[in-house]
Amino acid sequence: MGELLKVDKIKTQFQTEKGPVTSVDEVSFDLKEGETICLVGESGCGKSVTSLSIMHLLDRNGSVTEGSILFEGKDLAKATEADMRKIRGNNISMIFQEPMTSLNPVLTIGDQLTEGIRLHMKYSKTEARKYAIDMLKKVGIPRAEGIIEEYPHKLSGGMRQRVMIAMALSCRPKLLIADEPTTALDVTIQAQILNLMKKLREESNTAIILITHDLGVVAEMADKVAVMYAGQVVEETDVYTLFDNPKHPYTLGLMKSIPHITNPDDMRLDSIPGSVPSVHNMPKGCRFYDRCPHAMKRCLEEKPLLKPIEDKQSHSIRCFLYEKEEQDYENKKLAEKEVSS
Amino acid sequence: MPLSEQEKPLLQVKNLKKYYPIKKGVISRTVGYVKAVDDVSFDIYPGETVGLVGESGCGKSTTGRSLVRLEDPTAGQVIFQGKDLAKISNKEMRKLRTELQIIFQDPYSSLNPRKRIGDLLAEPLIAHKLATRSEADKKVNEILEIVGLSKQYKNRYPHEFSGGQRQRIGIARALMLHPKLIICDEPVSALDVSIQAQVLNLLKDLQKELKLTYVFIAHGLGAVKYISDRICVMYLGRVMEFATTKEIFEHPLHPYTEILLNAYPIPNPHMRDRKQIVVEGDVPSPANPPKGCVFHTRCPFAKDICKEKIPTLTGKGHTVACHFPLESVNV
């Protein structure tokens, strides 16, 4: 599997009346073909802004000010709007959270679905329509020939999300960004959509960036996971390591604070005290400092970096608690390098 | 919470129906009804938490709102402490509202943006003429402390608070009048995961301290399991199953309950390959519900009788509305 996307230390800033606001800071991850990465975190942690940065869909006052986003070797952070138009919907496509508002209410499903197909795949009108109907059938929409003439308000939330998926996958993108695709849906519909995404992923070998706050969805879908907090990745590893051996205090807190149906009866939930710091007033040191049960003096002043530690799989943590492990790992790598040279 | 048989229910819902007319044409002729709640009955005992769960459109919110008469029922009774809420005068209802409170889902739209927190919270006391300004002020301080907010926040406006804090304010407002029963209408759905746990724990602690009774409405089963003593599973305006939390999770009898439990993604990647029953199709429209059992269009075990006859809620303690409850299917 070749490397498809490499996001390297991007920083996304918004110009506001109160001055520049950094909502994504030093976010890095990479993705191979066919792989699924989940970005997990609470609202305001920068997971959506990260995906919008990749797609160049930020509001006019926002921009990627540092770092690079290499997609098939091309830096999207420096791409022009014309370049992006060729990529969006073609090589990279996106599904949004709100199926109720992400379709245009005054255009039929067919109009919206064939627009991208005709533009990127250069199909004629009739070919595009036929292809669109095939796509609708593929995502499990009954009566696809009829639905294609309908307006979005006739469809239920689950159906609209299927239409969005059909639209996103119609040009066979290499990368699909799904921003909370099932959050607005009911659980039985969520199960349908997740199954559909799994099936289509297998068929098309599309890489997926899945943004969610639901650890259940992460466990079902992800190959690897980046846990985000206040605009930074605080822990990144494969999905099994994350659930079996979570390390960062925020990840640990998040896991313990979620009520789940498999929890034992009398277990009291641990809650993380306080709330996410505001973007206008980020702590100087570690951003989790005032909510962390293990906070030390130096966490207030110094910024921890995201560094790998020794584990079965690659596992990086942004926390001083694991400094020794991080140092050991670094020394080991250095030693290995010396031996080989 | 152990339920003694002799205990009198705090609130009884009997054959509650709420239909919304569908109007069409120039003269707004009624062409049909959306049966949001159709023949729902249950009892709520003092000190317990009853969870109402189901997918959107199942009527759980409408049921909750009917319990505090924010909706006037089309038919049926809601009996609170021996009084039928639908029959009493507005004046009497006003008095009863001190004992029945509701916490809303969206903490962003349920607080008046032009009022300071202190005034917002004092309003119920002043409106019911239960306290003077200065007394109310003292009470506000007390309640703010109970819900874990600093009393300095009194002079701030709602927009200055985060979602979790606003929900605490919503809870504080419901507590101002020392109610007996609080309807919690999806109180944590709009909150971040790390904040949800805070609010759930707060609700649990308050219940113990103040001997509150809750009706907890949610679509997230995790939260419902965490907080409820008994659970009522609804689908298309009808009660499918009603039992203790333990029973619902360990021995679900209704296929819909089983499917709902099954549809939940489990936060354990080692279990991702488990066998899952995924139901096809959407929830039918409540304007045109299926004949017979409302779930038969999606039920994997549906037989002919399910299309004809509406199953009644039967059983003692653990009630279920199904012609073929799961145990008999498995045998």
Image: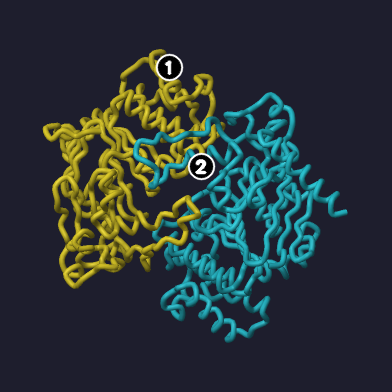
For badge 1, the amino acid type reads: Asp
Q: Which residue is mark 1?
A: B137
Viewer-proximal residue, A333 or B229? Answer: A333
Residue B255 screen position, x and y as percent? 27, 60
Residue A80 screen position, x and y as percent? 79, 62
- Observer-side mark, 2 or 1, equals 2
Kindly give the residue lying farthest to the right in the view shown. Answer: A341
Residue B172 screen position, x and y as percent? 41, 27
- Label 1 secondary element: helix
Viewer-proximal residue, B38 or A245? Answer: A245
**For residue A129, above or below residue A20:** below
- Label 2 secondary element: helix
Question: Chain A in the picture: what colour?
Answer: cyan
Q: Label 2 marks which chain's residue? A: A
Question: Chain B in the picture: what colour?
Answer: yellow
The residue shown at (56%, 44%) is A245
**Tag on residue B57?**
none
**For residue B71, above or below residue A210:** above
For badge 2, the amino acid type reads: Met
Q: Which residue is mark 2?
A: A255
